[in-house]
Amino acid sequence: SVPLSFFGGIGGASRAGILIKGSNYLETLAKINTVVFDKTGTLTKGEFAVEQVVTLNNAIPVLAYTSALEQDSSHPIARSIVQAAKGEKLPFVTNNREIAGFGVSGIIDGAEVFAGNDKFLKKEHLLLPKISDIGTIVYLVVNNQLAGYLIVKDQIKPEAKQTIQALKKLGINQTVMLSGDRKTVAADVGKKLGLSQIYAQLLPQDKVNYVEKLRANATKVAFVGDGINDAPVLATADIGIAMGGLGSDAAIEAADAVIMDDNPAKIATAIRISRKTLRIVK
Ligand code: ADP
Ligand code: MG
C-alpha cells in the first residue's frame, strides 16, 4: 500500500501547480540527479516573432508561401509565421504535411514546396546560405531551389536562469539542454542560463537516444519538455514532465507529471517536495 504522506506529497505538489500522476513518481523525483530540458517552450517562451524575411527568388512571395504551408501546424514557429502573414493573400496548398523536427511541406501551384530547417536542405543537397544572425531560420524551398528564408526569434523565460540555480542548490549539477534548433541559438541560450551540457540540431529520436545513454550510466533522469515532438523522449526518461499550458495534448498524455503554468522552476519545487515527503515516509 501507498504510505499516506505520499498523498500529502502529491497534494502539496498539486497546490504548487505540479500534477504528479502517481506516488511512484514522487520516489523517482527524489532520486533525480540529472535534469534534461527541451529548449523551445520549456526554457524559452515558445513565442516566436518573425524578425526578417529574405527573398532570393522574386517570383515567390516568401512570407505568403511559408505561412500557407504552416497554417495547420501548432508548432510555435508556425504560429509566429501565420501571425506575421495576417492580412496577406495566401496561395492554395494541397498535400500539406508536417515532418517532426524538420518543418512542413505541400504542393503550391504545382510546385513541391518545403519550409523548415537546414537538416532538410542538407538531405536534399541544397547549398546553405551564410547567415550570421543568432536566430532560428526557416528556409523556403520551391521545386528543390532555395526561394528565401525567415529569421524568427524566441525569448528566454524569465524564470529559466533561477531554475538552473535552484537545481544546483539541490545538488543537481547535471543540467542538459536538448534542442532541435541551430547550434548558435542553442549555445546562446545554454550559456546565458549556465547549463552544464548543450546538444543542438537533434531529431526527436536523437533526444531519445541521448536520454537512454544517460540512464544507462546509472543516472536518474528527468526530462522537461513541451512539444508534440517530445512525446517519445518524455516516455523514455525516468520521469517525463510536460508543460501544461503550452504543451501539446500528446506531450501531456505521455508525461508522468505536468507543470500547470509552464514555469520551469517548478521542477526544483517538485524535487524539493518529493525529498521532504520521502524523508517523512522513511
Ligand atoms: P526544439 O527541440 O527546439 O523544441 P523541435 O523539435 O520542436 O524543436 O523542432 C526542431 C526544429 O525543427 C525547429 O528549431 C525548426 O527548425 C524545425 N521545425 C519543426 N517544426 C517546424 C515547423 N512547423 N515549421 C518550421 N520549422 C519547424
Ligand atoms: Mg519543443
Image (tube, rainbow, N blue to C red):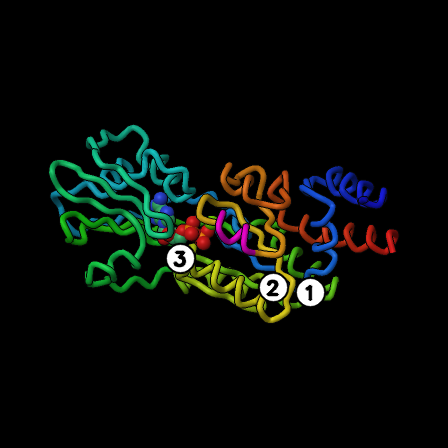
Residue bearing the label numbered 3: 203
Q: Residues within 10 Å of mark 2 (few under 14, many from 20)?
A: many
Q: Quadrant of the N terminus?
A: top right
Whole-angstrom CA distance, mark 2 to mark 3, is 19 Å
Whole-angstrom CA distance, mark 1 to mark 2, is 7 Å
Say whether residue 51 is visible.
no
Q: Which residues are magenta?
A: 231-236
Q: Are marks 3 and 1 in contact (CB under 8 Å)?
A: no
Frontmost of labels 3 and 1 is 3
Residue bearing the label numbered 2: 175
Residue depicted at 60% across the width and 64% down the height: 175
Does the residue tagged 1 have its C-beta within 8 Å of any atom of ligand 1?
A: no
> How many discs appear?
3
Report the front residue among 115 and 21: 21
On the image, the x and y values in percent for residue 180 come to: 42, 56
Residue bearing the label numbered 1: 172
Q: Residues within 10 Å of mark 3 (few under 14, many from 20)?
A: some
Residue extending furthest bottom?
A: 217
SS at mark 2 in the image: strand
Say whether residue 120 is visible.
yes
Residue depicted at 68% across the width and 40% down the height: 19
Report the front residue among 132 and 227: 227
The answer to whether 206 appears left or right of 85 in the picture is right
Q: Main secondary structure of the magenta part?
A: helix
SS at mark 3 in the image: loop
The residue under label 2 is which amino acid type?
Thr
SS at mark 1 in the image: loop
On the image, the x and y values in percent for residue 97 come to: 29, 40
The residue under label 1 is which amino acid type?
Ile
Q: Are marks 1 and 2 in contact (CB under 8 Å)?
A: yes
Does the residue tagged 3 have its C-beta within 8 Å of any atom of ligand 1?
A: yes
Whole-angstrom CA distance, mark 3 to mark 1, is 26 Å
